[in-house]
Amino acid sequence: MTILRGTASPPKYQRLAADLRRRIDSGEWKDGGRLPVENELEEQYAVARNTVRLAVDVLVNEGRVLRIQGKGTYLRQRARHDHRAYVRPARRGPMVPSGTTYVDEAREAGRTLTVDFEVAAVLARRDVADWLGLRPEETVMIRRQLCRVDQEPYAIEESHYRAGLAAGTALMDDEPVPGGDERILAALGRAETSATDHLTARMPGPAEAAWFGLGAGVPLLVNTRVTRDGRGPIRVVETRYAADRARLLFELGEGAAAAG
């Protein structure tokens, strides 16, 4: 077995990592299966032991494999969990509460969802202030949900509200709101009827990487939603997902949900 060469040849360990990645993607090793030990890979690819170690380091950093001291290197058993980032409403009206969607998805997948809530007053980031029509660094309330699926960290959802909108409501409580945050907003006369999503990817900060338990090379998927009603913007919801365990679905048009 040889490592394919490109026209602008990258380092040998990167080419070895690329071929191991190809073999993993082809299903040669199943989830939880053990990769060949280092001396086997040395013989298969006719490379030095250090080249093998560097290549496997790449896969470890990507979150694809896990080294277990004294046992070997194994494919990570990590099932992706689908989340409907946008669900087409059955009829014109308020948007579907995200909390309800999380619960339904976990139940359908036969998995267990747990959510911890935190509430804090912070200075608005410049982008959040712009979206909400606030002055830079004006105070906003953040309602944070730390979501785990089968106890594995899955998503961090942060809803940013004007401080005056959230004051004196259940949005200030660090616990679930019956019917979802959307019910409180509707009772305040601010039912969310439209939204714009901004979907990006970035590398996690140290605290994020630690909470998610990410490999050094695994990015976050970041979905930032700005919701509105007829009077203007209501809130900014930023949800961060670990890219190695989440897939975001956007249902558009008739019959989209059935095709999922």
Image (tube, rainbow, N blue to C red):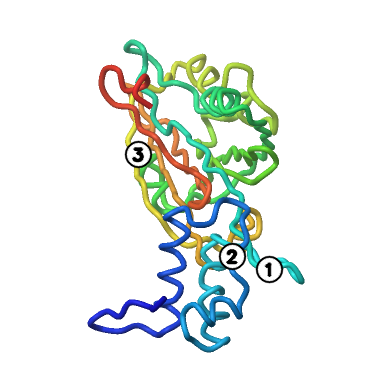
Q: Which residue is mark 2?
A: 35
* Callout 2 amino acid: Leu
Q: Earlier in the sequence, mark 3 or mark 1?
A: 1
Q: Which residue is mark 1?
A: 72
Instruction: For mark 2, give the secondary structure.
Output: loop
Query: Given the current orientation, which residue lies at the most extreme right position?
Result: 70
Q: Residue at x 59, y 58 (%)?
A: 75
Whole-angstrom CA distance, mark 3 to mark 1, is 42 Å
Badge 1 amino acid: Gly
Q: Quadrant of the C terminus?
A: top left
Q: Residue at x 42, y 78 (%)?
A: 14
Numbered circles on residues, count:
3
178 relative to 119, above or below: above
Q: Residues within 10 Å of mark 3 (few under 14, many from 20)?
A: some
Q: Is residue 213 left or right of residue 216?
A: right
Which element type, helix, strand or loop, lies under badge 3? strand
Percent of width and height locating residue 72? 68, 68
Name the residue type under label 3. Answer: Asp
- Quarter-of-image position of residue 64: bottom right
Image position of 167 (left or right of 192): right
In terms of depth relative to the viewer, which is nearer, 82 or 5?
A: 5
The answer to whether 6 is drawn above or below residue 217 in the figure is: below
In front: label 3 or label 1: 1
Indicate the secondary structure of the residue bearing disc 1. strand
How far apart, in angstroms, are the residues tagged by discs 2 and 3?
Answer: 40 Å
Q: Are marks 2 and 1 in contact (CB under 8 Å)?
A: yes
Reading the chain from its start, which is encountered first: label 2 or label 3?
A: 2
Q: Identify whether 204 is placed above or below 41.
A: above
